[in-house]
Image (cartoon, rainbow, N blue to C red):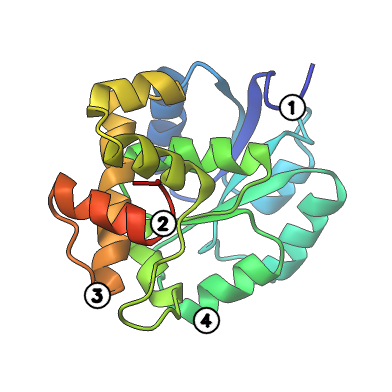
C-alpha cells in the first residue's frame, strides 16, 4: 500500500490546549483519511509519544521552548515525518527559513480551516503547500507575470476554466465542494497579487489560456 493510499497518521503540537483539542476534533470530523493519533503541547511530548513517528506533524511555530525550528524540522525529516507549520507570523523571512529547513507546508492561523486538511494531504504526498495569505509575500514574480500555483491549484483552475461547475471540479478531484471553492479563492488571490483581475470565470479562463494551464 502506498503512502497516499493509507490513512494519514497525524500528530498536532500546540501549547494552547483549547485550540489543540478543538483542532484535533475538527480534523477528526472533517477528514476520514486523516487520523490524529497524537495531540501534545510540547516538543518532548511528541518525541516521547508511543505513536511517534507519524506521517505528518502539524506544528505550531510559536512554541515557547527556545528550540530552533530548523532543528525540529531536521529531527522530523530524519525519521521520515513531514512537517506542516502553523503560525501567527507571516513575515516572508520566517516563512522562507521554515521552508528552507525542510517544512512541507506553512499556514497562517487565520487561514480557512479547510486549508489545514489540504495542507496535511499535500505534505503526505510530498508536495509543498503555502497559505494563500502568505503566498503573495513569498511570490517574487513581477507584476504582470503568472503567480506560482501548486499542482492541485492548477488542476482546479484547469477544470473550472474549461467550463466545469464547482461541483464537478470537486467530484473529479475527490475533494469537497467547499474545498474546491477555497482553492478558487486562493487562485484568485494569487492572481490579484500578481496584478491580474480574474474575478469572473471568463477572466480566469483567459488567464488559464495565456499561462498555458488550458489550451484554447
Q: Residues within 10 Å of mark 1 (few under 14, many from 20)?
A: few
Q: Is residue 93 above or below residue 149?
A: below
Task: Indicate left or right for 121 with 182 as reference.
Answer: right
In the drawing, what numbered circle is on residue 131?
2
Asked whether the residues under the numbered discs 4 and 2 touch, taking CB atoms below 8 Å apart as contact, a structural biologist would say no
Which of the 4 image quadrants contains residue 170? Answer: top left
**Mark 4, residue position:** 93
**Mark 1, residue position:** 3
Q: Please report whichever mark, 4 or 2, sits nearer to the chain's N-terminal start.
A: 4
Quick one: SS at disc 2? loop
Give the Cα separation between the discs numbered 3 and 2: 19 Å
Asked whether the residues under the numbered discs 4 and 3 touch, taking CB atoms below 8 Å apart as contact, a structural biologist would say no
Residue 109 or 185: which is nearer the viewer? 185
Residue furthest toward the left? 200
Quick one: SS at disc 1? loop
Q: Is residue 161 above or below residue 204?
A: above
Quick one: SS at disc 4? helix
Observer able to see residue 110: no
Q: Please report whichever mark, 4 or 1, sits nearer to the chain's N-terminal start.
A: 1
Residue at the spot x=66%, y=38% of the render?
125
Residue at the spot x=24%, y=33% of the render?
163
Task: Measuring from the top left, give residue 116's x and y in whole percent.
Answer: 44, 41
Residue at the spot x=68%, y=44% of the render?
126
Q: Nearer the viewer, mark 3 or mark 2?
A: 3
Q: Residues within 10 Å of mark 4 (few under 14, many from 20)?
A: few
Q: Is residue 37 above or below residue 56?
A: above
Give the Cα separation between the discs numbered 4 and 3: 23 Å
Amino acid at each position: 500500500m502506498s503512502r497516499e493510499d493509507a490513512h494519514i497518521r497525524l500528530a498536532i503540537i500546540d501549547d494552547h490546549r483549547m485550540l489543540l483539542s478543538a483542532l484535533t476534533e475538527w480534523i477528526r470530523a472533517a477528514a476520514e483519511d486523516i487520523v490524529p493519533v497524537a495531540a501534545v503541547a510540547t516538543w518532548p511530548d511528541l518525541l516521547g509519544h508511543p505513536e511517534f513517528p507519524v506521517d505528518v506533524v502539524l506544528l505550531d511555530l510559536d512554541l515557547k521552548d527556545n528550540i530552533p525550528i530548523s532543528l525540529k524540522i531536521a529531527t522530523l525529516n530524519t525519521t521520515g515525518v513531514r512537517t506542516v507549520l502553523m503560525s501567527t507570523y507571516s513575515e516572508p523571512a520566517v516563512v522562507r527559513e521554515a521552508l528552507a529547513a525542510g517544512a512541507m507546508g506553512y499556514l497562517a492561523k487565520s487561514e480557512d480551516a479547510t486549508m489545514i486538511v489540504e495542507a496535511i494531504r499535500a505534505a503526505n504526498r510530498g508536495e509543498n503547500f503555502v497559505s494563500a495569505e502568505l503566498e503573495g509575500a513569498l511570490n517574487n514574480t513581477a507584476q504582470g507575470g503568472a503567480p506560482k500555483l501548486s499542482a492541485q491549484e492548477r488542476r482546479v483552475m484547469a477544470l473550472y476554466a474549461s467550463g466545469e461547475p464547482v461541483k464537478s471540479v470537486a467530484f473529479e478531484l475527490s475533494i469537497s465542494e467547499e474545498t474546491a471553492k477555497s482553492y478558487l479563492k486562493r487562485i484568485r488571490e494569487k492572481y490579484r497579487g500578481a496584478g491580474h483581475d480574474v474575478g469572473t470565470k471568463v477572466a480566469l479562463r483567459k488567464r488559464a489560456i495565456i499561462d498555458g494551464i488550458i489550451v484554447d
